[in-house]
Image (cartoon, grey):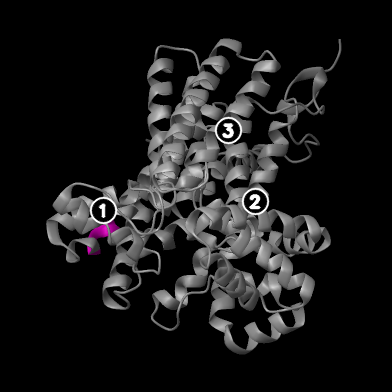
Amino acid sequence: MTTPHRVALALFIFATFAFLHVISAVNPSFPITPDTHSYVAPLPTMLAEGRFATDDGPETFRTPGYPLLLLPLYALGGDAGLLLVPAMQFLLLGLTGIVASRMTALAFPDRPHAPAAALFLVLFNPTLLINACRIMTEIPFTLAVACATWCMLLGLRAGRVRAAALCAGFSMLTVATFIRPIALYLPWVAAACAIVTLLRRALPLRTALVALMLVAHIIATGAWTERNARLADMPSFSTAADYALYEYIASAVLAVHDGRDWQTVRHEHQALAAALPPRERHVFMRREGLRILAEHPAAALRVGLRGALPLLLQSSTGHIPELLGQRHGGSGIIYKFVSMPLGDFIAHVLREERLLVASLAAGSAYLAALWGLLLYGFATECRTPHTATAGRLRLPRAEIVLPLALAACLLALSAGPMSVDRFRAPVVPLVAMVAGAGLSRIAERVAARRKRPDGDPTDDTAHSPTPSR
């Protein structure tokens, strides 16, 4: 472990104790969210009868993975034992940073400082730090996705660890699916990347093995999804994506098209869906959501464009006022931004949300830097680095395309432009890989400038064309 790694981990440990102290001394109720009850409610039944039961639909809607993770703490101290959940999740966050560092070292072996940079970007990401304090699925799900991606990257390498890595990748994808059902879609995206790489005849055997593992996982989780749907008398392959499409995206599109308040339209949609039996409800939500998007493409484009900025820049720092005991959370500001007229939105936040806007601005500055480093690292990777072909664009390697494709999938599936900040937590370690490489590249250029003697006109000799003799 290098000195930058030790410094980052030491600062993270200090931040962990600071957050836990604020929670215990200022706002002990902060870890409890509206979604917390659905994870805690099954625990007594699981402990007493050894079975998982929930009123939120089949297991593909409210999966048993996170309650299983909470069960040991609940068994030790009941509701009081759940007070240790933030400490456990900070530990998982530290492991996520280490996994991101190892992934970066695997994908960028020629960037010695990139792993430490990725570790820092993960450990001090506001979305992860804030959500580690809350009894929700984001942190363990992020760790599971990062571990699965790391195993797939190992599977693309030569060596004896390939078979073990693929088995571990299968297991971690299963864990991720048991924690949050959105992971059902990740193997499809990863398999598509593997097949495209296979068609390019790059790493054919290794890529074929990774694709085979992903197809096996798709079959296994597809059978599990179909089984749960039949047991609950639901349509085939019903998931929570039906809710996101109908209640969030479609209602926002309709609100923008009709010039109405988004919350009013959403409540009307909820009432219409609630009046139907569960099986008909999900067919209705899926069909109506797609119909609204097809009938109002201009409004859908406006919602997408208006939501793109907060989708990328809204961090969980909006919960800092709540953490300090001053107000209730700030996730709803994204819905107001997308659905309200811009002038009314600005007047609203300046009148009622000043502390919220200040905390969001701090987090957005961090995220803007993260996305900038991502673009720089990706652009650097797309340039051929040596000899007479320097300056030409090339397709990035599979080790880079795969994590970024999974990140894009997670962004698109988490209700798109209407998603709340915590849904973007699992994207962070995947993005931090390339962003860490970009930060390492900037550090190398700065160091080269300092070492270069005055008057030397060259800026980066390592990436200049080799002169012909």
Kind of residue indicated by mark 2: Trp
| Magenta run includes residue 85 | yes
Q: Residues within 10 Å of mark 3 (few under 14, many from 20)?
A: some
Is residue 298 shown left or right of residue 352?
A: right
Q: Quadrant of residue 175?
A: top left
| Element at label 1 | helix
Q: Is residue 438 above or below residue 254?
A: above
Instruction: Tell me, yes or no, if residue 103 can be seen here.
Output: yes
**Residue identifier under label 2:** 371
Is residue 381 shown left or right of residue 29?
A: right
**Residue identifier under label 1:** 70
| Coordinates of residue 397 in the picture (x, y in percent) | 65, 26
Please give the name of the residue rendered at 54% of the width and 73% of the height, measured from the top-left corner: 359
> Magenta stretch mostly in which secondary structure?
helix
Q: Residues within 10 Å of mark 2 (few under 14, many from 20)?
A: some
Is residue 392 shown left or right of residue 81?
A: right
Q: Marks 1 and 2, how far apart in space?
A: 33 Å
